[in-house]
Amino acid sequence: MATDLYNPASQRAVEALAAKLRRRQVLGSRTAALETVVVLRQVISKARFTNIEQLVGIIRSVGRKLVEAQPKEHAVGNTVRKLLHLLREEYHNATKRSASTSPGGFSIAKFVLQGQPKKQAAGPKAESSLVLREDDPDDPDSFARTLKPVLMEAIQDVLDELETVYDNISKSAKDHIHSDEIILTIGQSHTVEAFLKSAAHYRNYTVIVAESGPSYGGHDMANSLSSAGISTFLVPDSSIYALMSRVNKLILGAHAILANGGMFAVTGSLLAATAAHAHSTPVVVCAGQFKLTPLWNLYHEYAALDFADPSSVLGFEEGDLVDKVDVLNPYYDYVQPELVDVYITNDGDHPPSSVYRLIKESYGDEDKL
């Protein structure tokens, strides 16, 4: 069993994160992704393995446990798939380096791969120190000892990407928001918040924030933007359609971006996107690439089939009325790809039609959980 290959301390860390995910104590996709990377780094650093299959089995078993704890938090599974993809890349690169024993002659293929022909002699010598020996009976730990430092660097790159995702997305804010525009957003999204605050350094504009009942996250969003000196108005969700004719751009956050170019977003996003489509208002979505989810048929009449407490919509104090109605309070809406104009990620701007290509580049087909 793969779970027998990592130590009790790592198992406790995995169980602790699974319990937090199950109880919804980890709030936000970015936080869930960060905690997943930290736990996987601990598991890999302390694991014992003699070949690549054992290591992949360890990571997969941890990933399955975390995903099963909270299937609706797609950032967890995305992060595990990303690390598996990086692991295979590092392993294949190391295998190719160890297989090349001599510099060999010059060729067009090597020129394209290495960039310049003069680096040909120095490249293999510098990289030949990394030799992988799988299932070595004389030194069983040699494979793990050689591969772990490379994997730790790759994991650190993923952590750095997650920690700087807001800054990288916000870099293009001034190119999308212009002076005197009226921007509409809904609820609270830390990505959208950072994006709007970044644009405020270069442009004077107005933001209308829909309160997003019954969670009313828009209240905190409006307070934060107003504190940053941005002209901000808080409006009820019922006024979105009436105000849309005056809005220049709708900016939304995303919980998960699906392979067909659609997305899961906070409840009310479908209402806003549909109103924007009716008024030919551009819909811009700000989201990190860690939210790209290689799943297709998730959408349903009630999006992710993830529901919050109905008492915030209709409380038990209503008496007889509670027994006569079914109250649904979904966490997310499913927004179709035809309602979105562009996704702004930490790796540039992409139309919904190119999301599938981005997912193919980010995850391997064999890395299913």
Image (spheres, helix red, strand yellow):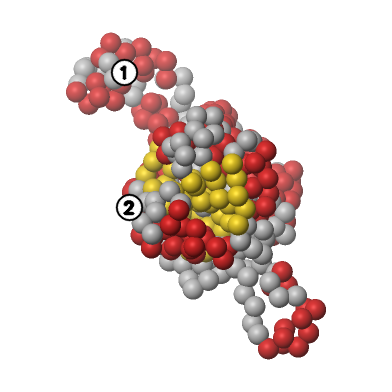
For label 1, the crowd category at 10 Å Cα-Cα, with few meaning under 14, some 14 to 19 and many 20 or more, is: few
Q: Is residue 211 above or below residue 120?
A: below
Position of residue 29 in the picture relative to residue 310 (left or right): left
Residue at (21, 17) in percent of width and height: 106
Regarding residue 192, the answer to whether it shows in the image is: no
| SS class, disc 1 | loop
Mark toward the start of the polypeptide (2 vs 1):
1
Kind of residue at badge 1: Ser
Label number found at residue 222:
none
Residue at (32, 13) in percent of width and height: 119
Give the camera-side residue of 18 and 21.
Answer: 21
> Which residue is denoted by mark 2 in the rendering?
353
Count of all numbered marks drawn on residues in the image: 2
Q: Is residue 137 above or below residue 1?
A: above
- Residue 23 horizontal/vertical position (percent): 72, 59
Label number found at residue 102:
1
Position of residue 62 in the picture relative to residue 245 (left or right): right
| SS class, disc 2 | helix
- Residue 268 horizontal/vertical position (percent): 55, 62
Quarter residue 67 falls in: bottom right
Give the camera-side residue of 190 and 89.
Answer: 190
Position of residue 111 in the picture relative to residue 20 (left or right): left
Residue at (41, 34) in percent of width and height: 175
- Residue 356 horizontal/vertical position (percent): 36, 52
Residue at (72, 83) in percent of width and height: 322
Kind of residue at badge 2: Ser
- Residue 162 horizontal/vertical position (percent): 56, 38
Camera-side mark, 2 or 1: 2
Give the camera-side residue of 55 and 255.
Answer: 255
Position of residue 306 in the picture relative to residue 365 (left or right): right
Q: Real-space Cα distance between discs 2 and 1? A: 44 Å
Quarter residue 55 falls in: top right
